[in-house]
Image: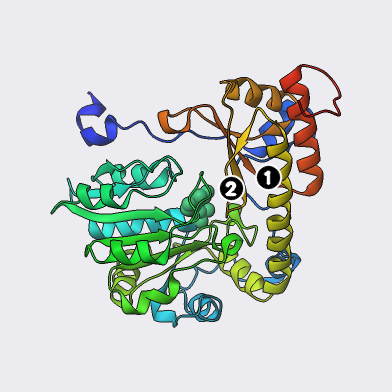
Amino acid sequence: MNIEELIRPELAAMGGYTPIEPIEILEQRAGGRIIKLDGNENPYGCSPKVYQALANYSYYHIYPDPEQKKLRQALKEYAGLSHEHIVCGSGSDELIDLILRLFLKPGDKTINCSPTFGMYPFSTEVCGGKVVDVPRSENFAADMAGIKKALSQETKVIFIASPNNPTGNTITEQEILELLDTGKIVVVDEAYFEFSNITMAGLVPAYPNLIVLRTFSKWAGLAGLRIGYGIFPIKIASYLMKIKQPYNVNVAAQVAILASLADVDYLRGNVAKIVAERERLFGKLKELDWLKPYPSSGNFILCSVPSGEAKKIWQQLQKKGIFVRYFNSPRLKDCLRISVGKPEDTDALIEALKEVKHGRKKSNSNS
Ligand SMILES: Cc1ncc(COP(=O)(O)O)c(C=O)c1O
C-alpha cells in the first residue's frame, strides 16, 4: 500500500518548516548555559505573577472556556476594543492558520512580502492555497505597486508584518489604508507591537477587511505557553469563534494571560529595557565595520555580512554557546538575525563576534 497516494499531493510535495533544537539539547551540547538570541524570545521571561497564578490554579482537570469570556474581557482593556472584536489562539500562529481556513478555498491565493515571517506561506500551503510572493524593495519596504499588480480574483489575504520579521521595519497607516482599499483581507501582524508602539488596531472598527494579530510570546515572555490574539471586525471574529477548536487556548495559557494583564507595568518595564538594549546593541554592531545592521522596531536586529562569512560566524558563535539565526535566501544573502538579550548577552556577543572574525581570543579593537 502506498500511503503517498492517499496524502494530498500538495502537502506531500511541501517542504515544511525548519525545526530548531530545544533549549535543553542546546545546553547539553554546549555543556552549560547558552545565550539564546535566535528566537526573538524575551530574555526577562514572564511576570512573576504568572508563576504564582499557575501554582495556585486548581482546575487543570476541567476543560477551558470555549468562549474565552474572561480572556476577551481582560484583553478588551489592553487592546482598546470591545470583546466581540477579540479572538484568542494557541499563539498567533494558530490564528494565521484559522484565518486562512476561513477564507481560502483550494487554489485561492495569499500575498506574501518576502523576506517575512515563514508561517504565512506555510499555512497558506497547508490550507490548500497558493502563495504569491511580492518581494520587498532594497530597504525592505513593502512594494505597494507590486502588491496591487499581483492581485487577482483568487487573492483573498494580504499579509504584512509590522514590525516585519526579520527586517525590523514598520509599515505606515497610509500604506495599510491603500491595501484596505483593494477590498482584500489585510492581516497586519503586530507580534512586535510593544517594541514599536505603532498599531493599526484603532482602524479595525472602520474596516470590515482589516485584521490585527498580536501575541504574548514577545513582550510578555510567554512564547512557551502559546498565546496570541487577534483584533478582528466583529463579523470575522464571530466566524472564527464558530470554526475554531473549542478548547484551543489551554487553561494554563488562560491563567497566564490574566496574570500578565494584571502586571502590565512590570512587563512594560522589561519592554523598555529591551528597547534600550536594542539601541545599544545596534550601536555596538555598527562599530564592527564588517557587519551591516539594519535599524529595527522589534526585539531583534538583522545584519548582513558583506564579506560572505555569515555562515562561518554563525557556526563559530554556536561553538561559543551563542545562538543567532542565519539566513541565506536570495534576498537575505549572508544575513544574521540577532534577538535582543540582556546587557550581559550583548557584551558576550560583541566580544565573541570580534574573536570569531579575527580568530583570536581577546580583542579591544573593532577592526
Ligand atoms: C511576525 C510574527 N508573527 C507571529 C509570530 C508567532 O507568534 P506566536 O508565538 O504568538 O505564534 C512570530 C514569531 O516569531 C512573528 O515573528
* Residue at the image point whose x is 69% and y is 38% from the top: 285
Instruction: Give how far apart the Cα atoms at labels 2 and 1 are.
Output: 7 Å
- Type of amino acid at the residue the image marks with label 2: Pro
Q: Is mark 2 within 8 Å of ligand 1?
A: no
Does residue 280 appear to the left or right of 260 in the view shown? Answer: right
Q: Secondary structure at mark 1?
A: helix
> Residue 161: x, y in percent?
44, 54
Query: Are discs 2 and 1 less than 8 Å apart at CB?
Result: yes
* Residue at the image point whose x is 68% and y is 38% from the top: 286
Closest to the observer, 214 or 158: 158
Closest to the observer, 252 or 356: 356
> Residue 178: x, y in percent?
29, 63
Q: Which mark is residue 295?
A: 2
Closest to the observer, 120 or 255: 120
Residue on which disc 1 sits: 282
Quadrant assignment, res 11: top left
- Type of amino acid at the residue the image marks with label 1: Phe
Q: Which mark is residue 248?
A: none
> Residue 185: x, y in percent?
27, 62
Mark 1 is surrounded, within 10 Å at the Cα level, by few (under 14), some (14 to 19) or many (20 or more) other residues, namely many
Q: Vertical placement of 208 versus 122: above or below?
A: below
Considering only order in the chain, which callout, 1 or 2, is on the residue closer to the N terminus?
1
Q: Vertical placement of 18 versus 186: above or below?
A: above
Q: Secondary structure at mark 2?
A: loop
Quadrant location, the C terminus: top right
Numbered marks: total: 2
Determine if residue 246 is in view. no
